[in-house]
Image (cartoon, rainbow, N blue to C red):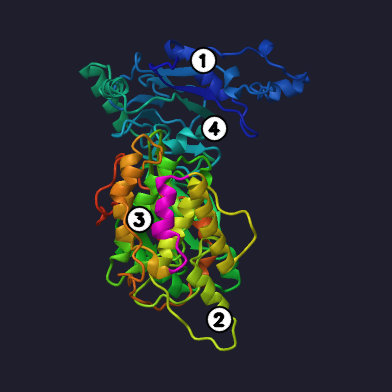
Amino acid sequence: MADTDLIACLYPFVDLYTDGGKAKKAIEAKANATRHAPARLTETETEQPQLSRRSRESTPLEQPRKKGVPAYFHHPAVELRFSHGPKTPYGFVFGHNSNSDVVLKCGIQSVSAHHFALTFDDHYRPIVKDLGSLNGTEVTYDDQGQGWRSDFVWIIGGHRVPSGKKTIVITINENLKFQMVVAHHDITSPQYIDNVNRFRQGTANAENLLGLLDLRRRPQTERASGTHTPGNGPIVLKKKLGEGSFGVVTHLWNVSTADECALKKPSKRAIREKMVEVDAWRKEAHIMGRVSHEHIVALLGSDFTSLPRLRFEYVPGGTLHDYPDLSTGECLQILRQCLSALVYLHGQDPPIVHRDIKPSNILVQHRHADDIHVKLGDFGLSREGPDPTTMCGTWRYTAPELSEEMDNRKAAHYHRRSYTLAVDIWSLGVAVFECAYDLPRRNATEVPWCEEIVKKLGDDLKRDPDDLKQFLRDAMVILQPTLRRTAQDCYDQAVLLADSAQDGCLTPTPAAYARGRRQPLVGRGSAEDTTTESSQNRSLEDDSAEIGRHVRSNGLPPESTAMPPPPPGRGQRIPRHLAVDLQSDEL
């Protein structure tokens, strides 16, 4: 059972440069006895190698050899608990002054009287805060995020990024390092919130509180020789999410604010081979800047001062390619949500054609037991306005009219033809068919491949009929583009299909299907017949499978989409992040 009273434990940290002796001395000091906890495991419980006397003297807190046991299990700790809270609202204060909650008397000059504190931010997340120390503090996450700072905040828990790190280290000096192990809690639970609120009030009386405040106004310890001068500016953790031929996407997370985004910029290869088509990047930024919808990844900012940089919201769940076990009910939710996005895009003036819809470009915001929320991403191949004529997309999901166009371009006498918004309807239908069932296993390409898809869908429907297959066959996965329904028609029908899928599965119900089914509009000219022209976005074309894998908002998870979503319309623009510095990759 989880210890709901425990906030965190502070252990000595041992690495190639620090033996942990100073940290152990501070932890075991008499002043910290009421918070002291002995090592969980003793040396006799660990498979330790035989070392010479000289080796033992040089590594008094060496790492244990027993597999599967954290190194800190073998070291004493300072336990920080709600029940034994801090003296003041500053939180647990660490410093060499005896009035600190945790006294760091270990003979190191660079420790300030009140150096740093462990407390909580306004979102109930545990944080480390440097209290304006002269020499500064450094906090690293799995050896990332280096940088000395004074009067600075680091989030160390209550968020999936720090919670996913194995080792969070607080460094005061090269010889004084601590490992902070934060207890995992549900930060939305009433008990936890109540504990944090009481914690932030402190436990000292007014006289002691004023005494500590006076101490903090006194000059800090003089800067010790060999110490670092604290730097300025934010600290951002970076993680590469994907890379294609022409672009790379990196996740950025601000350690102080938890602001995050996915930064898309040209790859080193594209820069080296002079293949950065700035106009194509500008076009993507322009198109994405026009749209705002709950099921479309949001553009947060762009910069073209030197090389193109586009900032998108970060979507944490990966893409549909990462979910091989999607239920039919989930696929119906995905279909409705993506159709909602297409209604919005195709309804713009001029209309926007995505041109590269596929599972790897559909990102997952969250997936719960009875709910999945997705967003359409990677608009690198999208076009707006009349006549989207250039070749685009991935052949596996490419509409037959585009495949035929590619064949025609190889002919001696070629006359360019336009295609319509219906290319997006085909691609989405094929993507949902693949996620819910399976595509053919044959090696055909272009038009023969499209014919194989239609044949398999028809065969599957005869063998094992259900509403979703019937809908895909009659409305979306149709060889003739003029026979495909518009995005609005498809959306309206998909919402009706939801009546038979409230339990998360689609049982064939002819009566329910008859209520919602419309006969194919044979020979009808589509409202999407607005034709377009565009040039190929080569700089982004090959990146779609990898580049759009993750892009996310910082807000709470969206409301459940298990019920049919509201009619498609303008969504709310995600707030811009604070102080965006695109040139320095900082949030």
- The residue at 46%/36% (across/down) is 162
Pair 1/3: label in front: 3
Which of labels 2 and 1 is toward the front? 2
Pick the quarter of the image with the N terminus.
top left
Q: Amino acid at mark 1?
A: Glu
Q: Which label number is shown at residue 339?
A: 3
Comparing 349 with 197, the one in front is 349
Q: Position of residue 291 (x, y in %)?
A: 31, 61
First along the sequence among labels 2 and 4: 4
Residue contact at pointers 1 and 3, CB within 8 angstroms: no
Residue 161 magenta: no
Mark 1 lies on residue: 28
Residue at the bottom extreme, as displayed: 413
* SS category of the residue bearing label 1: loop
Marks 3/2 in contact by CB < 8 Å: the verdict is no
- Looking at the picture, does residue 181 appear above or below residue 36? below
Is residue 586 visible in this depiction of the protein? no
Q: From the viewer's perspective, is residue 573 above or below residue 157?
A: below
**In terms of sequence position, does the residue under pointer 1 or pointer 4 come before the other?**
1
Q: Which mark is residue 266?
A: none
Which tag, 1 or 3, sits closer to the chain's start?
Answer: 1
Q: Which residue is mark 2?
A: 409
> What secondary structure is marked by label 3?
helix
Q: Tell me what residue is drawn at x 44 percent, y 56 percent.
A: 473
Separation of marks 1 and 3 at Cα, in angstroms: 62 Å
Distance of mark 3 from mark 2, alpha carbons? 31 Å
474 horizontally vs 292: left or right: right
In this view, the mark in front (2 or 4): 2
Viewer-closest of 475 and 416 = 475
At label 2, the amino acid type is: Arg
Horizontal and vertical percent position of residue 429: 44, 56
In the image, the segment drawn in magenta is 465-480
